[in-house]
Image (cartoon, rainbow, N blue to C red):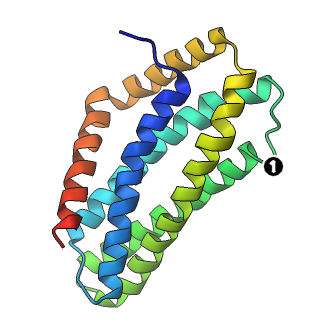
Amino acid sequence: MAEQSPTAILEAEHHVIQKIVGAMAVLTEGLEAGQEPPVETLGHIVEFMRTFADKCHHAKEEAHLFPFLEQRGVPARGCPIGVLLHEHERGRTLVAQLAQATEAYASGNVSTRDAVTEALRGLTELYPSHIWKEEYLLFPMSHKVLSAADQQQLVEKFAEVEAAIGREIHQGFERIAEKIVQGTHAL
């Protein structure tokens, strides 16, 4: 089996996140057209973003990739690392807003539809450009400044993150992403 690079691992996770972002866009359009979003789907999106996107994906970047890059001379402030960290925080804020709005919506408070819509819209606007910055700015920079030994060490650190979360949890969220996408296409 060929060894994976740390950026290939992160890019594969981006593909899963992009599926959810696409589903969020469909839900946003539906909400704007007066459709009622499935509460269960909204809950799955919140859990996906908290666990897969943040505790798995962002953790690999923040706890491991970014510090390695900083050790190799990439500044922690400004672009790309400082900007990406700011966007991670913005994403967490939007997910928290979505969670709160979804909880209120699930309890029958339909007046929170606008809050659900705004949080979904914010996430669908944030993530495509965020992923672009990582794949077209950060990752090429990583390839230039990280040695083969650094990259191997990152792959090992990423495996530790996976082990802490549980590989089956990660794979379960990949399956949930597929179900969410299929469900939103049926709307």
Above or below, comparing residue 52 to residue 64 in the picture: below
Q: What is the number of callouts on the image?
A: 1
Q: Residue 115: horizontal and vertical position, in percent?
A: 43, 81
Q: Residue at x 63, y 34 (%)?
A: 139
Judge left or right: residue 71 versus residue 84.
Answer: right
Within-10-Å neighbours for mark 1: few <14, some 14–19, many 20+: few
Hey, what amino acid is under mark 1? Gly
Viewer-proximal residue, 25 or 162?
25
Q: Is residue 66 visible?
A: no
> Is residue 140 rendered to the left or right of residue 55?
right
Residue found at x 28% / y 90%: 34
The x, y position of residue 162, in whole percent, is: 40, 27
Identity of the residue drawn at 41% across and 69% down: 98
Per the image, the residue denoted by label 1 is: 78
Badge 1 marks a residue whose secondary structure is loop
Q: Position of residue 116 (x, y in %)?
A: 39, 77
From the viewer's perspective, is residue 35 above or below residue 73? below
Residue 120 as seen in the image, left or right of residue 133: left
Q: Position of residue 180 (x, y in %)?
A: 24, 57
Viewport quadrant of the C terminus = bottom left
Which quarter of the picture shows residue 14? top left
Say which residue appears at 69% left-offset and 13% top-offset: 147
Q: Quadrant of the N terminus?
A: top left
